[in-house]
Image: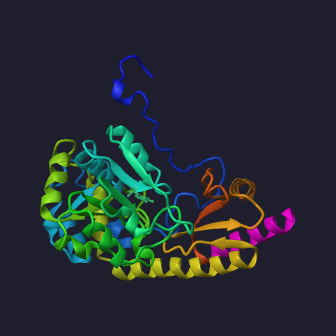
Amino acid sequence: MSRFLSKKYSALAPYVPGEQPRERAYIKLNTNESPFPPSAKAVENARRAAEKLMLYPDPEYKLLREAFAAEIGVKPSQVIPSNGSDEILDMAFAAYCGESPAVFPDITYGFYRVFANKHGAEYREIPLDGGLAAAPADYYGAGGTVFLPNPNAPTGILLPLKDIESIVAANPDNAVVIDEAYIDFGGESCVGLINKYENLLVTRTFSKSRSMAGARLGFGVACESLIRDLETLRFSTNPYNVNALTAAAGIGSLADKEYFDSCRKEIILARGEFTERLEKIGFSCTDSKANFVFAKHKSIGGRELYEKLRANGVLTRYFPGERTGEYLRITVGSAETMRAVADVLQRITEETK
Ligand SMILES: *Cc1c(COP(=O)(O)O)cnc(C)c1O
C-alpha cells in the first residue's frame, strides 16, 4: 500500500475470484461459467458492432433496455444495464447502505462483505438454518438493506416466490435486493413484484445462463424511483458502463430464445443426473436450483476433495469454515463432462476408503 492511499480504503480486503489458470487445460468447474458458447446471434452482433467502435455507445442503451425489459415483462424505464451484475450490487451498496446497515446471510456471495466494507457500511449476517436455507422470518423488519441471492450461493437453495414477497413486504422502510444470478436454472423470478413494491431491486446477469461471463453484462430491475437513484450513480461514474460490443451481444442473446432455453435445459438435466451419481457414492447434496451442486461426502472433507480433483485436472471450489468446510461447490458443465467428473469422484472415494 502506498502512503497516498485514502484511509477509508486502507483495510479493504478485496474479493478473491475463482482461479483462471493458464498453465494446464483443467476441466473448469470453479466459477459457475457456462460450458456452452454464447448464442451465434450474440457473436454476430458483436462482430458487426466492432466496426463502429470509433463511436461511444448510446448512454441510454435504448435498444438493449427495450429487449431485456420485453424479455422479462417490465417497462424499459424499470431496468438499468450494468457492467456485470456486480456493478449494480456495488451501486446498491453505495446508494442504500451506510446510514443503515446491510443485512445478508452468513453463508452467501462473498462479494457482499467486500462491498459493505468498501462503502463503509456496517453489516449484519443472519445465520442460515440447519439445512443451510434462509429462513424468511429472520429477514422481517431487518433494520437495514437486505441482500439475498435467490437461489443462494454457494448452497443453490431457492426460496419460493411467496417467501421472497413476504421479506419484501416486511421491510417497507428499507430496500431489499434480490440477486437472481442463478434464477434461470429452475427458479421463479420475483421481477413481477416491482410493480407492487417500491423497495424491491432485482439483479440479473448474462454471465451464467447466457454464457456471457466474459462480456460483463447485468441489469437492475426495479420501480422507476429506484432506477433513477441508480442512474444518478451510473451517470456520476461512467455513462458508458456497458461497452458497445457487449450491448450488441446482449441484444443478440435475447433474440435467440431457443438457444437460451436449450442450454439451460441441458444444465438442469445434467445437474439431476450428476446429483444422483454423487448420492450413490456417499455424497449428500443440497437441493440446488443453480448451475452448480453443493455436496459433502460422508467421510472426505471439502478441501481434500478439492485437492484430489485438482490433481486429476478438475477445478472446483471449497469454502473453509465451520458450516461449509465439508462441502465442495461443483459447477454443472455439459452432461458428458459431468459423467467424467462423477467417474473421477467415484475413483477418489474408493481409493480413500
Ligand atoms: C456470479 C454472481 C454474480 C455476478 O456476476 P456478474 O458476472 O458480475 O454478473 C452476482 N451474484 C452472485 C450470487 C453470483 O454468483
Residue 236 seen anywhere in this rendered image of the structure = yes
Q: Residue 106 placed where, x, y %?
A: 48, 54
The front one of 350 and 139 is 139
Please provide percent x and percent y for residue 200. Answer: 24, 64
Does residue 48 appear in this view?
no
Q: In this view, does 200 lie to the left or right of 178?
A: left
The location of residue 83, given as percent across then percent down, is 31, 53
Quarter of the picture containing the C terminus is bottom right
Q: In which quarter of the image is residue 4?
A: top left
Please give the range of residues in magenta. 336-353
The location of residue 283, given as percent across then percent down, is 70, 71
Residue at 85 percent of width and 62 percent of height: 352
Above/below status of 5 relative to 322: above
State ligand 1's quadrant: bottom left
In the shown orientation, is residue 47 left or right of residue 16?
left
Location of residue 287 by image quarter: bottom right
Residue located 19% across and 46% down the image: 233
The relative height of residue 215 versus residue 237 in the rendered view (above or below) is: below
- As drawn, the residue found furthest toward the top would be 3
| Visual colour scheme | rainbow
Q: In which quarter of the image is residue 181?
A: bottom left
Between residues 160 and 90, which one lies in front from this camera angle? 160
Is residue 350 found inside the magenta-colored segment of the image?
A: yes
Residue 342 lies left or right of residue 65; in this view the side is right
Total marks shown come to 0
The quarter in which the N terminus is drawn is top left
Q: Answer whether residue 231 is magenta in the image.
A: no
154 relative to 321, above or below = below
Towards the viewer: 96 or 18: 96
**Residue plotted at (21% across, 65% down):** 222
Main SS of the magenta part reads: helix
Residue 121 lies left or right of residue 29; in this view the side is left
